[in-house]
Amino acid sequence: MTRKVRWARQARADREAVFRYLLKEAGLTVASAADDKFATLISLLEAHPETGRAAGRKPNQRKMTLARFPFILIYVIEPDWISILRILHTSRRIAGQYSD
């Protein structure tokens, strides 16, 4: 069963901030590559939401690392959709950075 993805407001802001940061620091090619990786990851999650590893205290909270980039996607599997909560840099302490 394919599930739709819903982005929390903070997750959208995180994705935009990642793009802007990479654009400034590494250029359009790198920023676009990271954003393409996010899109690929979302397509994977729509078809296979259990792909990520458990994160947080609840069994439906999960995380996935963006390949070749230092970012973690935090999400929750709901019965009919997937909620993307945050995109965080791997150097950040993630406890308390997202809510359910």
Image (cartoon, rainbow, N blue to C red):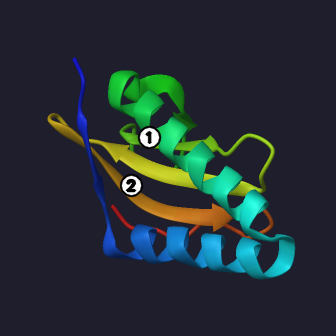
Label 1 neighbour load within 10 Å: few <14, some 14-19, many 20+: some
* Residue beneath the point at 52% across and 38% down: 41
* 1 and 2 marks in contact (CB < 8 Å): yes
The part of the image, by quadrant, that contains residue 12 is bottom left
x%, y% of residue 48?
A: 40, 22
Residue that mark 1 sits on: 42
In this image, 58 relative to 22: left or right?
Answer: left
Query: Which residue is at the far right?
Result: 26
State how far apart marks 1 and 2 are (Cα).
9 Å
Kind of residue indicated by mark 2? Ile
Identify the residue shown where x is 42% and y is 33%. Answer: 43
Q: In x, y percent, where is residue 10?
A: 41, 75
Q: Is residue 59 above or below residue 99?
A: above
Up/down of 45 relative to 34, above or below = above
Residue 57 visible at all: no
Q: In terms of sequence position, does the residue under pointer 1 or pointer 2 come before the other?
A: 1
Q: Amino acid at mark 1?
A: Ile
Locate residue 34 relative to residue 30 in the image: left or right: left
Q: Which mark is residue 1?
A: none
Q: Quadrant of the N terminus?
A: top left
Residue 14 horizontal/vertical position (percent): 52, 73
Task: Tell me what residue is drawn at x 54 percent, y 46 percent.
Answer: 55
| Left or right of 10, for residue 28 | right
Q: Nearer the viewer, mark 1 or mark 2?
A: 1
The answer, for residue 18, to whether it is visible in the render is yes
Using the image, tell me which numbered label, if any, was put on residue 84.
Answer: 2
Residue name at image x 78 percent, y 56 percent:
70
Asked whether, in this view, residue 77 is left or right of residue 16, the answer is: left
